[in-house]
Amino acid sequence: MEHIIRTTGYLAIFLLMVAEACLIPIPSEVIMLLGGALAAQGKLVIIGVILAGVAGDVLGSYIAWAIGRYGGRKAIDRIGKYVLLDAHDIDRAEHWFSTKGEVTVLVSKALPFVRTFSSLPAGIAGMKPIRFGIYTFIGCAIWETGLAVAGYQLGAKWNSIVHDFSGASYVVAAIVVLVILGAIYHRYKKVRASRNKVSTIK
């Protein structure tokens, strides 16, 4: 991912953030931290990193909102298997949205993990697009700015960190990949079991 962002710059950050907000499992933490680090090294400009990240996040959030708004639960059930999302996840997100209100969108967009799932229930609930956009923009701006600035602070030391841990980095990378694959497999089994249970009931 570092190579993609380094070579493609703001466009890569924008597109990756669109994908992340559309429920594709790409961690925004990595995207924005890398963008900030590259800005500190003079490869990018920090304000450009933030703007690209926020713009991508808002656009992706609107896409997810539109799926919920115009497709409803049926559309989510159809696409859920492709992003490892099951009915229980949506039920939980809808319940949180209905109990906490529309401000949930603003708060969740500035929080890890839950931020990705806030747009769908907002669309299903029929949240007005302008209000959704305002809340989403504020939350995304807080999240992306914080990550980009943290990456910028780290950026000056990025090369030395990579150099110092170059020998162990391959081992660490392998462990991280295995953990991610294990988490994805576990998630896949959970979603598949949930869908099989629903099919059996029907």
Image: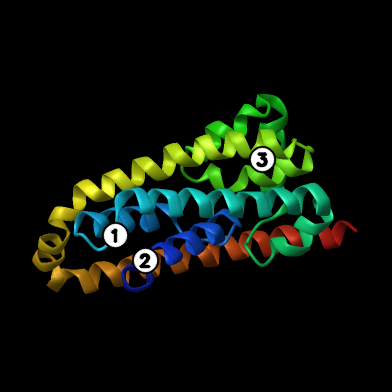
* Quadrant (top left/top right/bottom left/bottom right) for the N terminus: bottom left
- Residue closest to the eye, 181 or 102: 102
* Horizontal and vertical percent position of residue 93: 66, 40
Q: Residue at x 65, y 25 (%)?
A: 100
Amino acid type, label 2: Gly
Q: Is residue 129 left or right of residue 16?
A: right
Q: Rounded to the nearest whole Å, what is the CA distance between mark 2 and mark 3? A: 33 Å
* Horizontal and vertical percent position of residue 45: 29, 54
Q: Which circle, 1 or 3, is nearer the viewer?
A: 1
Amino acid type, label 1: Leu
Q: Rounded to the nearest whole Å, what is the CA distance between mark 1 and mark 3? A: 36 Å
Amino acid type, label 3: Ala
Q: Residue at x 48, y 37 (%)?
A: 110
Q: Which is nearer the N-term, disc 2 or disc 1?
A: 2
Q: Quadrant of residue 165?
A: bottom left
Q: Which is nearer the N-term, disc 2 or disc 3?
A: 2
Q: Which residue is mark 3?
A: 93
* Quadrant (top left/top right/bottom left/bottom right) for the C terminus: bottom right
Q: Which circle, 2 or 3, is nearer the viewer?
A: 2
Q: Are there few (<14), some (14-19), or many (20+) residues within 10 Å of tag 1?
A: some
CB contact under 8 Å: marks 2 and 1: yes
Q: Which residue is mark 1?
A: 44
- Residue closest to the eye, 14 or 67: 14
Identify the element where label 1 is drawn: loop
* Horizontal and vertical percent position of residue 14: 48, 60
Does any portion of residue 98 appear in the rendered image? yes
Q: Which residue is mark 2?
A: 9
Does any portion of residue 197 appear in the rendered image? no
Q: Are there few (<14), some (14-19), or many (20+) residues within 10 Å of tag 2?
A: many
Q: Residue at x 67, y 29 (%)?
A: 102
Q: Quadrant of residue 7?
A: bottom left
